Amino acid sequence: MSQSTVREIVSNNAVLHLPDGQSIELPVITGSENEKAVDISKLRAQTGHITLDPGYGNTGSCQSGITFLNGEKGILRYRGIPIEQLAAKASFVEVCYLLIYGKLPNQQELTAFEDNLNHHALLHEDMKTFFSTFSGQAHPMAILSAMVASLSGYYSEAADGVGGFDMNAARLISKIRTLAAFSYKKSIGQPFIYPDDSLSYCGNFMRMMFAVPARDYEPDPVVEEALNLLLILHADHEQNCSTATVRTVASSHASLYASIAAGILALWGPLHGGANQKVIEMLETIRKDGGDVSKFVKMAKDKNSSFRLMGFGHRVYKNFDPRATVIKGACDKVLSKMGIEDPILDLAKQLEAAALEDDYFVERKLYPNVDFYSGIIYRAIGIPVNMFTVMFALGRLPGWIGQWKELMDDPTHRITRPRQVYTGNTEVNYVPLADRK
Ligand code: CMC
């Protein structure tokens, strides 16, 4: 069944009996992969009750035709196409088009899209001064989110909401590379390198990151290929924390730039995209500590310790993360092609093996996720550790944009505004300052 037809399919009703004697029939919605959802949209109006689902583990916030994910079976598909096929055959630019416009581009569409990206790769020259106003300690994610929000001050179509969408989407996809590379160049005190239209999306980014004016720079095809793969694997993941944030912000009719800037900030957290930086820091800590992985597995199980195995576990995947499987294979390939031996890779494999044999991890279905091995590839291709989450943002951007568009194109969407169960004081009187204890 094709995408976006789920709304019409109402198969049967569920009946909810409440303790106060009320009962209500609730429609059951079936998605195109036979996923079932109880539609509670009339629950409060008809019964005065709401549902409570902290962390939204059981709550569908929207109907979407972009990404299908089955965590039990380890399936991930963008617009129906398995991630393994896209990882093996597609370019990241094709995947951007696929996620945003719903189909793979034909040659003409791809060329036009690529031309559009090239056309928008430069930053407004005035924006360059922004980079010098950040302290040397500023995390690149702080800079990236601020710069993306600032784009709306330079490209006025952003304020028009859906109008100018194609141009704003292309601007974002193209300029985010330039922003990321310029913030890196600033942090190491090197001059900015301007984009070069003759290069691929990834080659252009690598050049802006690593070229210097004094020398010619040829992007390494191994590195380009690895980067292309990583960006594709990160490109969308249905209603994860940052995507849900983008949709939430967009639901107030904030601009594309504002919504994406919010998504970048949500991604930054160590339980989400920030995990890739934390994985490498954890592996370095283990190495410096003598490399005894069992000690850290034990610590991760200890409920008195706040330590978690970073890069392990996932809200949705309860079997394996198909992205992690692809990345693990790529990791070996990239490192051997580049002639790099990284002791951290051996440690990662030992840690994975130790955890996967451990009852605690087995019982809780905790497996390596996308962030477990991605950092090892980023390290091998020269990306500094504090830029790892920026790389995740580059990859996730087309997903955020596609989800923003899907929400805006849906005439039935409403502002996101959850309810709560209030647990504070019942009514109390104001106490004058002099009478307070
Ligand atoms: N190490 C040790 N124990 C863990 C871990 C971990 N990495 N992850 C979950 N657990 C335990 C957790 O303590 C809980 O145990 P118990 O049932 O005894 O209380 C159980 O497993 C369920 O965990 P949860 O926190 O309720 O699961 P969640 O779905 O709310 O959280 C998660 C998912 C990804 C935030 C969590 O697994 C985690 O913190 N992982 C480490 C951070 C990480 O790698 N994040 C990247 C996620 S993938 C990239 C992305 O798309 O964001």
Image: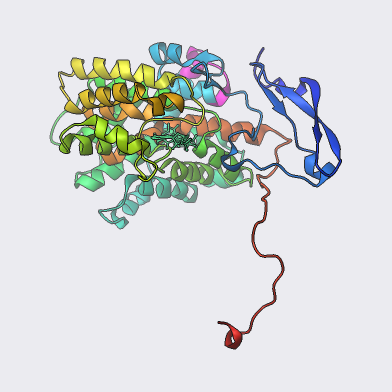
Q: Is residue 326 left or right of residue 397?
A: left
**Viewport quadrant of the N terminus:** top right
Residue sitting at the far left: 214
**The one of 201 and 125 positioned closer to us in this rendering:** 201
Which residues are drawn in magenta?
Answer: 100-110
User: x, y percentage for residue 131?
Assistant: 31, 51
- The answer to whether any part of residue 204 appears in the image is yes
**The one of 311 and 168 positioned closer to us in this rendering:** 311
Residue at position x 16%, y 28% in the image: 216
Name the image quarter holding residue 12.
Answer: top right
Residue at position x 67%, y 16% in the image: 34
Q: Is residue 175 left or right of residue 430?
A: left
Q: Is residue 321 left or right of residue 183?
A: right
In the picture shown, does residue 278 fall above or below 399? below
Residue 81 highlighted magenta (yes or no): no
In the picture shown, does residue 430 fall above or below 351? below
User: x, y percentage for residue 331?
Assistant: 27, 20
User: x, y percentage for residue 264?
Assistant: 44, 42
Residue at position x 22%, y 26% in the image: 347
Residue sitting at the far bottom: 434
Of the four image quadrants, the one with ligand 1 is top left
Total labels: the figure holds: 0
Residue 106 highlighted magenta (yes or no): yes
**The one of 416 and 299 positioned closer to us in this rendering:** 299
User: x, y percentage for residue 213?
Assistant: 17, 37
- The answer to whether any part of residue 197 appears in the image is no
In the picture shown, does residue 2 fall above or below 165? above
**Viewport quadrant of the C terminus:** bottom right
Residue at position x 67%, y 78% in the image: 430
Name the image quarter holding residue 199.
Answer: top left
* Coloration mode: rainbow
In the picture shown, does residue 127 fall above or below 117? below
